[in-house]
Every structure is written in structure tokens, then in C-alpha cells.
Amino acid sequence: MPAAASQPAPAFATGGYVRQQGTFTGRISRDGSTGFLAEPGRYHLYASLACPWSHRALIVRRMLGLDRCVGLSLTDPIVGEHGWQFLDSAGGRDPITGARLLSELYLASDPGYAGRCTVPFLWDAKAQRIVTNDIPQITVQLETEFGAFHRPGAPELYPPPHRREIDALATLIYHTVNNGVYKAGLATSQAAYEEAFDALFTTLDALEERLARRRFLLGGQLTEADVRLFPTLARFDAVYYLHFKCNLHRLADYPHLWAYARDLYQRPGFADTTDFAQIKRHYYQTQNWINPSRIVPKGPYVSWLAPHGRDRMPG
């Protein structure tokens, strides 16, 4: 949920970055007991190809074959004066609701809403309101409550026997890597920046060691934990290394992490939801307080399609 263009994201008085938590916390359920029945055509995902938090939902939707079950509207990568807006290529309006700005859907859901209007979220076309913008729960609901609509042979990304381990690993990755790059890049004090920087690279070093012994984070099976890590890795060298001052090592400097990232990228659902042009435009042309020139770097020149050799790794 990157910050809007007009102002930097909020920070602690100590200079540390604070991320807004999801404010709509409805739950979709397979039996409808929550008031939101999982059914095809009812729900719509609002997301941005530029946003790492959206990216994980886009990957899961595609991997599970929910494209025809859960609709999709994409915002423009450039956050305007009034927040996220819809793509000019679509006439500047959301084809589902006719909205021009994402904020219109937040206000339709809660006329008194005064928080930041962020992606991703799931919209209920029947009730004409946001169900949830609780980022971790969006993918979990797609994985668990929409099982009847998954494509044949779809992977089980959140298997019950491993959920405790997935959640624990995902929590570490969230605090030190996914959100850690933001804590470093948007810090307003040297101490807060260095604390986030050190935690980020300590975790990346540990993940490099872990992936030296196994193909995926939990072994031989790709899970929700891998999905949560990938969006940050995909943006690391192109954005976070320079723009967010996370410059101790590049992703490409980690033999196992870099091969692992390519392994994921070369799977259906990852490359086709990764748009490096939109990613770079968003960060370098939206966060003007970091990059007032709005110049977008041309690099890095790396091949995400290079052989990765991870298929020989043990489970």
C-alpha cells in the first residue's frame, strides 16, 4: 500500500515508518455464515500491478484459476493528487462501478471513511461495498473459501498441516522484508533507517541460507509463504536497492535467493502479474519527496528467464 503522491507515508515520532492496517475486515466463507457467500461472479479484486501488496493477490488469483470467478480492476500505477485512479486505457473509469477514483468505492462502502484509500481489496458487487482490505486475509480467503472454484490441479498454497509454520515465516518476512524495505526507505531518522536496514539484510541472509537446502521456503511445496516473499524480491534491485537505500546487497548478489526468485517468476501466475515498467513508474514518479526529478532508471539489466537449476533441489 504505497503512500499517495502528495505526502510521504506517516511515521513514528522516532522517525520509523508506520503502515496503516486494513479497516474493512469482512470475511467471505464457503457456507455464507459470515454474510458473504463464496460464489462465482460476486466478488471483484481491486489491485495495482505496481503495488507489492496487490501482487500477492494477483498471483494467487491466477495460480488458483479464479480469473473467471473473481473479477479484476486495475488502477493506474501513478497515484494522483486524489489518490489511486483508474487506467486511462479503460477510459479513466472502473468498468464495474464507473468510478474514476478508488476513494469513491471507499466512500460508497462507508460515507464517513477518512483513512487512506489503498489497494488491494475485495469488492462485493451484490452489496456494492468493500468486503475486506485486510491484506493477509485476501489471499487466505481465496485459498481456503473458494476451493470449489479452483482450477483442476491447482496447488494447495495454505495446507492445514503447515499453516502454523507458514504464518510464522510470513510474519517474519512481513516485518523485516515486505514492510522492512518501507521502514528503511521511508524512515525519517538515521537510527530508524539503520535498524530497519540491519533487520532486512539479517533476514535476507537467513533466507539465503534456508534456500540453499530446499527449493521453496517450506521444502518441496510452493506455499503462501513463497507468494508473500516474491513481490519484494521482484522489486528489490529495480526499486528498493536504490530508491529505498537498501544497498548492502542486490538480489542478484544472493546465489540461492536470486535463483529461487527466477524459479518462481518462470511459473504461471508470477511473470504474467509482474510488470517492471509499471513498478518503476509508480515508485520513481509517485514518491516525489524521495525522487523530485521523477526520472525513472533504465536498469537493471538482468534475465529473469535465465536457467535457475532449482528443480534439482531437495524438498
Image (cartoon, rainbow, N blue to C red):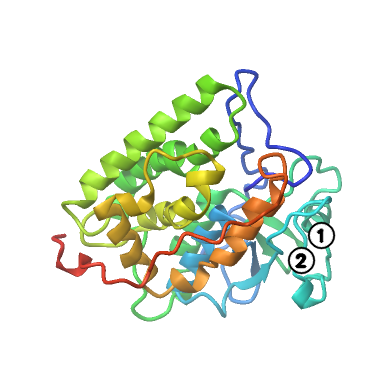
- Of marks 2 and 1, which one's residue comes earlier in the chain? 2
For the residues labelled 2 and 1, say whether their Cβ atoms are less than 8 Å apart. yes
Q: Quadrant of the C terminus?
A: bottom left
Horizontal side, residue 310 vs residue 60: left or right: left
* Vertical relation: 92 (above or below) 187: below
Percent across and percent down for residue 270 are: 44, 68
Q: Residues within 10 Å of mark 1 (few under 14, many from 20)?
A: many
- Say above or below: 31 vs 116: below
* Badge 1 amino acid: Leu
Check disc 1 and report its element: helix, strand or loop. Answer: loop
Label 2, label 1: how far apart the Cα atoms are: 6 Å
* Residue depicted at x 25% and y 62%: 221
Q: Foreground residue, 292 or 61?
A: 292
Q: Is residue 95 visible?
A: no
Residue extending farthest right: 111
| Residue under label 2 | 86
Query: Residue 74 location, x and y as percent?
Result: 67, 67
User: Could you say which disc has been placed on residue 101 in the image?
Assistant: 1
Task: Tell me the crowding category of disc 2: few under 14, some 14 to 19, or many 20 or more residues within 10 angstroms, Cα based.
Answer: many
Residue type pointed to by label 2: Phe
Q: Nearer the viewer, residue 38 or 300?
A: 300
